[in-house]
Amino acid sequence: MIRFPSPRSRRLTILSLATAGLLLASTIAAPPGSAGVATAPSGTVETADTIPGVDEIRSSPNLKQVANLPKVAPLDATNSDLAFQSRYAFAGNYNGFVVYDISTPTAPTVVSRVLCPGSQNDISVHGDLLFLSTDSPRSDDSCASTGVPSTETRWEGIKIFDISDKANPRYIKSVQTACGSHTHTLVPGKDRRTVYVYVSSYGPSDTYVGCPRPHDSISIIKVPVTSPTDAAVVAVPNLFPDGGFEGVPGQKSATSGCHDITVYPSKNLAAGACMGDGILMDISNREAPRVINRVRDTVNFAFWHSATFNNAGTKVVFTDELGGGGAATCNETVGPNRGADAVYDIVGRGDNRTMVFRSYFKIPRPNADTENCVAHNGSLVPVFGRDIMVQAWYQGGISVWDFTDSANPREIAYWERGPLNAERLTGGGTWSAYWYNGYIYSNDMVKGLDVLKLTDWRTWTANLVRYRELNVQTQPSYLGG
């Protein structure tokens, strides 16, 4: 979400059947019992002709809600991102975070709630450590801090918690970063004794204390895993020596930092969504990422928000958060190519790799003008032999789409609620929708945690994969690299 004045370590295990799954990768057949799954012949799903009523739920036959856990005070502010570890889900909220037990996905329970205000509270986990992003000026770095004007900024950055006891997380360390931390990305060190945190932030101004112009960089925090209280900023690389895209006032954002970065550690790759630019980076040296290719879309993209690689690392999907998540952009007026995803093929090798545009994807259902709807956070579904992604669209709901053919992406499943208000635009909807160990988890900004089950012949092999830890912006490889 765009900030207005007042979007991860990998560990996985694969079931023994995964070896057999590799042999199926190029010739996947539907498992027994899949013949009854209803999908259109073209591979797309049937779309309802009318917009659902307030809070009315609609979906394709192959995607069903199995649980909802509403948010409660004091964590009743806006819900944000999700992270996963073993049988737990960790959900960010502008007032702190919630730890859920999801060992029974159809009946999740709350393990603990931690009150610690500081938007957005973007969240990730690594072993016994949990990281939170603070991107609003605070009176200090404590969980009892209060908001202050940007002209009086005293603290913004990363908070670190010890979560060895999930029922009683302990705040142990803070690290201040330039312009705060809108989002962050965990990057495992190659020695396993270190984890790095790539901090993305933006929005500098001449009057913003701690965030002056220009701001063309990210902050890199080095965290010794066994002594996390020694965490500190070790580098502030300038990713845009030329200043980046200059923007178009009122239409397209200028580059002044990055909104979000997704890393693919096993391939030493990262993709940065940086407001006005999309970048591909080599992260072989974790403390010195290098930009090897940069793309712009001056026709349709307004705000480069986030990125997702396919499993092979040969494609990247960028999202455009047109309107900052607060506008109704899933309608005929805006059209199919704005506020959408863009699929790029990655061609070439080494430093000669380039990103080549192939197509746009946007949900095919029109939303009401009372619904904020735009491309937002999603994750790759770990399917053998296909490129399939689940994605949040705020009040546009949740979409599952196939981009195996880069030039012709197709939706294969969807689930959505009707608007929160029939008379006026009222912000809400799903912030993040991620696949984790057989289910889709959604952190709805207003309605709380939703759990959904996808039953589709094209995705059944994803059930062979079991993650032990998942931070979506630290992309795992489920086929070993």
Image (spheres, grey):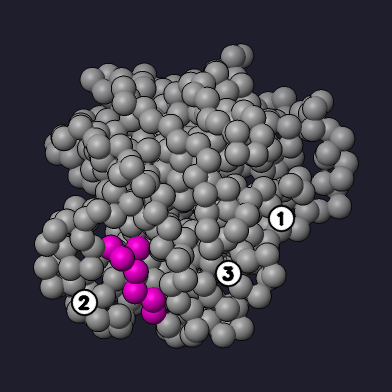
Q: Mark 1 points at which residue?
A: 466
What secondary structure is marked by label 2?
Answer: loop
Q: Main secondary structure of the magenta part?
A: loop
- Residue type at mark 2 is Arg
Q: What element carries label 1?
A: strand
For residue 195, the mark is 3
- Please tell me the numbered disc located at residue 154: 2
- Return the disc, 2 or 3, that comes first in the chain's sequence: 2
- Total numbered labels placed on residues in the image: 3
Residue 314 lies, in percent from the top left, at 64, 33
Q: Give the range drawn in magenta.
A: 174-181
Q: Which of marks 1 and 2 is nearer the N terminus?
A: 2
Asked whether the viewer can see residue 340, the reply is: yes
For the residues labelled 1 and 2, the Cα–Cα distance comes to: 42 Å
Q: Residues within 10 Å of mark 2 (few under 14, many from 20)?
A: some
Q: Which residue lies furthest to the top in this view?
A: 41
> Whole-percent x and y of residue 291?
49, 45
| Callout 3 secondary element | strand
Horizontal side of residue 470 vs 234, given as left or right: right
Tell me which label, 3 or 1, sits earlier in the chain: 3
Up-down: is 429 above or below 8? Answer: above
Residue at 58% of width from left, 48% of height from top?
A: 282
Examine the structure image and report whether residue 76 is included in the region drawn in magenta.
no
